[in-house]
Amino acid sequence: MTAKNQRLVLILLGLAAVVAAVLLAMSALKDQAAYFYSPADVARDGVPVGKAIRLGGMVADKSIKRAADGVSITFTVLDGAYRTDVRYTGITPDLFKENSGVVAEGKFAPDSVFDATTILAKHDERYMPPQLEGDKHKTETLEK
């Protein structure tokens, strides 16, 4: 085998190894990917029971109901005219409230209620932590 053929074989083996590594990584991550859905997407396309997704929208007004145990809640996520009921057990973020944005990670149960495992509260770009709200000097320093 000539030197030129040896280099070609090494390059082809290297490319095959890279392709194999990429395919292996993709197959390992495909089950971990959580796709984002809005209530309108769920109503239009449906979501299989047990599939991990992210559900995003606005928390409906007066929809947060807290259970007697102090950590379980139910609420409704809405997106225009579409609504999805959500169950969650755990401590909610400080920014979680009615009429604000939310992203819930979890799965749909057989009873068509979304069982959330994580709640992420969304805020707008003007959000200021409570510790800095009253201190204008610190705010101006952070903006620079």
Image: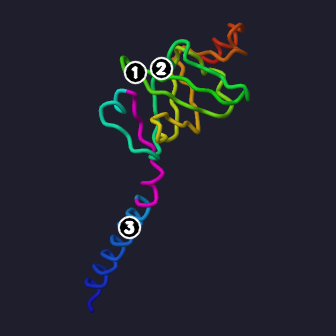
Location of the N terminus by quadrant is bottom left
**Residue 19 x, y percent position in the rendering:** 35, 66
Q: Tell me the residue at 44%/21% (across/down).
A: 78
Q: Tell me the residue at 63%/18% (across/down).
A: 142
Q: Tell me the residue at 31%/85% (across/down).
A: 6
Q: Residue furthest front?
A: 111
Query: Which image quadrant is residue 138 in?
Result: top right
Q: Is 112 displayed left or right of 141 in the figure?
A: left
- Secondary element at image label 3: helix
**Residue 93 x, y percent position in the rendering:** 64, 26
Q: Earlier in the sequence, mark 2 or mark 3?
A: 3
Is disc 1 surrounded by few (<14), some (14 to 19) or many (20+) residues within 10 Å?
A: some
3D distance between C-alphas at marks 2 and 3: 43 Å
Q: Residue furthest bottom?
A: 1
Residue holding disc 1: 79
Is disc 3 surrounded by few (<14), some (14 to 19) or many (20+) residues within 10 Å?
A: few
Instruction: Give yes or no for contact between labels 1 and 2 (Cβ–Cβ under 8 Å).
Output: yes
Q: Amino acid at mark 3?
A: Val
Residue holding disc 2: 58
Q: Tell me the residue at 66%/30% (across/down).
A: 72
Q: Earlier in the sequence, mark 3 or mark 1?
A: 3
